[in-house]
Image: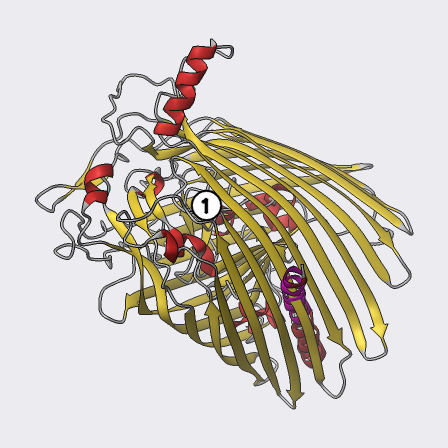
Amino acid sequence: MINSITRVTALAVAACAYVLQANSLEAIDSANSNTSIALDTVTITASSEEQLTSLRPAQEMDADALERSRASSLGDTLSQQPGIQNAGFGSAVGRPVIRGMSGGRVAILQDGLEAADASSVSPDHAVAVETDHATKIEVLRGPAALIYSADSAGGVVNVSGVTLSPGDVSDTGISLGYDTVSSGRFAALSHKQTSERWGWHVGASERRTEDYRVPSDAGEVHREDDGSIEAHDAESKYLDNSDIEYQRQIIAGGSYFGDSSVTSFNIGYLASKFGLPGHSHEEHEEHEEDEGDEEHEEHEEGEARVDLERLRLALNYNVDAPFAWASRWDTRISWTDYEHSEGHEEAGHEEHEEEEEEAEEEEHEQEHGMTTFSKTAWNLRTELQTVEKAGRQHVFGASAAYEDFSAEGGEALMPSTTTEKVGVFWLGEQAINDFLISVATRLDNTSMSPETPDELEDVCGFSTNDVKSQDFFGASGSAGVTYFVNNDWTVTASAASVVRAPDAEALYSCGPHESTFSFDVGNPELDRERAFNLDAGVAFQRDAWALSLAVYRNRVNNYIYASPLAEAGVIQEADELPVYEYTQNDAILKGAEIETSYAFSNEWSISVLADRTRGTLMDGGYLPRMPTDRVGLTLNRQSRNWVGFARWMTYADQDRTADYDGLVEGVAEEIPTAGFNLLSAGVSYRWVAPASEYRVGIKGENLLNEVVRYHTSFVKDAVPGAGRNINLSLAVNF
């Protein structure tokens, strides 16, 4: 319990550091504030202070932007932002890739605490946060992320729910949406009400889709025996098993407003059932397709389906001026119960079967990989922010987390594991004339206690004796300087050293992993990763012009990744899967991001963004699934009642691929990804009645109906993105 409390405290301190940084900047640059320029209606927006701070380069998607751009997955919602792309796995699954890093290197938070799902374990696991009712999504990249978590060398995404304040006006909202590409339906209802001392809110939403349409030339891409790459036409105009049977989110909460404090309690429930296109649990059997069959509602035998549920309870307490020397104290605690069942469904089963048939079905499910992932987690976080004095401010904090994870079934490739995390951190800032100096440190300890498996000898190269409890201690630090050149220009530079413990799946995996078409072998001898990050930026803002440029270089010592195993032996023969073993090598990720905008008038503006990332191993060769180079142009119009945009986004060819050819027999190099262009446009109209407000909108996506394959996806060659889509929406507030 002591370890849990400690871990929670570390997380809380991180949030405090966030507040501290923002406040000190506001104090320094309050005289230099500029009028913000209206940007793309679906882009992340941030204040100039947030963009320019070396340790706090945060971007923020507010409630209005979320209303216009919210998608069925978190990765898809953020995928149009500089430096962020989506590691998608069909409609319902998408994790953000930040500056080439994903999985356990990108921390996903809900209201400042870890989401506590299983999305980092496998690319086909959805992020379990209530994005339909989020009021803000915050993205932190580079060194800023370390004050939130040690598992965030790539960045942090914080999804914030409803926050109530005393005297907030009562508000009820209804949202409806329809997508033509998948016959998708969306509906949401929310209500909040406050008084001088009390406040409460509720919300509910549901999303349903059928299999989505794809272009006629969006068939599977694969490599022939002679090394050539073949791209086939789609066998159907619908991508099989890409539907969302349902996706439900329910939230409720209440708050008590004290004289100088706020106490709030929140409940979040998420349930989703959806298909995983691109793979089957039928042991790689050949499937017959009826090219003329357009009935995509029925699920054929062998299709992989996911049934996900998550319940989260959270208690927050914050108080202003708790002590004479402190400006704020914030404490958060959450409990999460998560379950994720994955396997195949067979068509034609009656609800009430005979006992003998049920037994046969259970045996069939076990044989073909029905798996249940479960996690129970506690998270605690507390942070204390000092009063600013002589341009100096501090944030102290601690966090603790306890996770009990289990996996049972055909794809339970790792043992049940209990993980305890404890962290403490400090951030200090000092303003000196036109400079702001920031220094942060963090200490973390991660303890993993796996259950000893029954059999491992001669299967994965390590024995049951190697599957044992391990402790990983890490000391991280960062330092940055912001130079306010004048009212228009700001220059930033920072350096950070961040330590991350290996994930449990990298340490202890041993078994077939159908979603990645591999047999995964862990390595209990893996050491900690240490990332050395250098980040520099320039920002300019004057009247109608705004510009931000960032360059970064991140060297990761002991970078953990799955590498093809040259001698597969009995594993490859038994499971007919290529064998990948977790190993370590030094790697370098570097890149640049630029975003600029110009406002022609109060109504018209234009913005341009471009980003690129390069990931290589020190021993030579590219890292797999690196983001594609992109350039985007957006034209925006915003008036009193009308909001419209048109966006052109070009994704370049990605031929900088991981090369296994000749290294491992039967495992060829990563298949290159062809570039594509995305044309999107939309318009919405808002009008106000005496007691209500209405908004109707229409938005077109992938209007050119191009074949979309994101190189960051594990299943890009078999699972293309959706074709042309028209989205209709209606929102009412009263």
Number of numbered discs on residues: 1
Which region of the structure is painted magenta?
3-18
**Magenta region, mostly helix, strand or loop?**
helix
Residue 522 seen anywhere in this rendered image of the structure: yes
Identify the element where label 1 is drawn: strand
Coloration of the structure image: secondary structure
Q: Residue at x 69, y 79 (%)?
A: 394
Q: Is residue 633 left or right of residue 426?
A: left
Q: Which residue is mark 1?
A: 94
Q: Is residue 384 above or below residue 507?
A: below
Amino acid at circle 1:
Gly
Residue 379 image point, x, y percent: 64, 55
Residue 669 image point, x, y percent: 19, 53
Q: In this view, which residue lies farthest toward the left?
A: 226
Assign the N terminus to one quadrant of the image: bottom right
Q: Is residue 720 left or right of residue 350?
A: left
Q: 722 or 448, which lies in front?
A: 448
Quarter of the image for residue 178 reads: top right
Q: Is residue 592 left or right of residue 496?
A: left
